[in-house]
Amino acid sequence: MHEKIYEAAKLILNSKRTVAFTGAGISVESGIPPFRGKNGLWSKYDPVVLDLNYFYSRPKESWQVIKEIFYDFFGKAKPNAAHKALALMEEKNLLHTIITQNIDNLHQEAGSKNVYEFHGNSRNLICTKCGKKYNVSQINLAKLPPVCNNCGGVLKPDFIFFGERIPEPANSKSFAEAERADLFILIGTTGEIMPASLVPRVAKEHGAKIIEINTGKSKYTNSITDIFIQEKATAALTKLVKMIFKLEKD
C-alpha cells in the first residue's frame, strides 16, 4: 500500500490538470449512508419518493421522506478528513476540479471552491411553478410540502430525481473536465450510476491516468484504473497528502 501511495503522490505532483471524481463512499465516514447496497437508504425507504411523477402527484408524501433523509438526517453531517484533504490539495494547486455525484454540500463546507455537482445539491430548493430558487435555510420545513412565497408553487429540492436530466452546466462541464484532465482520482464511487459513470471513462479515453480509492473493487478497477488504493477515503487521502508534502520537501 505504501508503494501505491508513493506512486499516486508522484502522479499528482507531475500532473498538469488533476480532477477528483467523488461518490457516496467519500461521505460514508461523515455518517451519510450510500443509497444502494446492504445498508443503503433504499433498503429502508422506497425509492419511488424520488420519482419525478410520484413527487408531482403526491408532493406531501414525497416530502415527508425527503425531509427525514436529506434535512433531518443529512443536515447534521460534517466534512470529514477526505473532504478536507481535497480542499487542501485545491488550495495548494494540486487539484483543479472536483466532480461529485453527491448532493450533500460537504466539499464546499470543507473549503473546496471548484466543484461541479453532477446530481445537484440538497441545500437549494426550486419552485416547480415559477423557477425561483431558495436556500433551504430560508424555508420552514415544518409544514409540508413547502411552497414558494412568490407564486405558491410546490418547492422541490434542487437535485435530480428519477426521470430528470443531469443539470447544466454541471453535465457539459464535467465531461469537458474529463477530456482535459491528465489525472483522474476516483473516490468512493462504484461506477454503477449512469450517466455519471461515463465521466471517468471519457477521461481515460482522452489519455488520463486513473487513481482509484475505494474500500472494494468497482466497475472501474479492472477496466480503467491504473493505481488501486483499497482503503477508506479518509485514511487514503490523509496518507496521500502527507506523501505529497514529503516528496515536495525532498
Image (tube, rainbow, N blue to C red):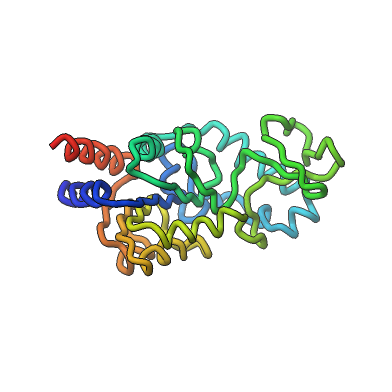
**Viewer-proximal residue, 223 or 215?**
223
Q: How many marks?
A: 0
- Is 98 placed above or below 205 here? above
**Viewer-proximal residue, 96 or 200?**
96
Instruction: Describe residue 34's horizontal placement relative to residue 68 as left or right.
Output: left
Q: What residue sits 83% from the left and 35% below the top? A: 149
Q: Position of residue 183 (x, y in %)?
A: 33, 55
Instruction: Describe residue 161's horizontal placement relative to residue 139 as left or right.
Output: left
Instruction: Describe residue 93's horizontal placement relative to residue 30 as left or right.
Output: left
Q: What residue sits 35% from the left and 40% below the top? A: 93
Q: Position of residue 228 (x, y in %)?
A: 27, 56
Instruction: Describe residue 135's horizontal placement relative to residue 217 as left or right.
Output: right
Which of the 4 image quadrants contains residue 151? top right
Q: Work out which residue is located at the far right of the displayed protein and give it.
A: 151
**Viewer-proximal residue, 246 or 42?**
246
Q: Position of residue 83 (x, y in %)?
A: 41, 38
Q: Indicate the quadrant containing the C terminus: top left, top right, bottom left or bottom right.
A: top left
**Viewer-proximal residue, 33 or 147?**
147
Q: Work out which residue is located at the far left of the displayed protein and give it.
A: 250
Which of the 4 image quadrants contains residue 243? top left
Q: What residue sits 59% from the left and 44% below the top? A: 121
Q: What residue sits 35% from the left and 52% below the top? A: 17
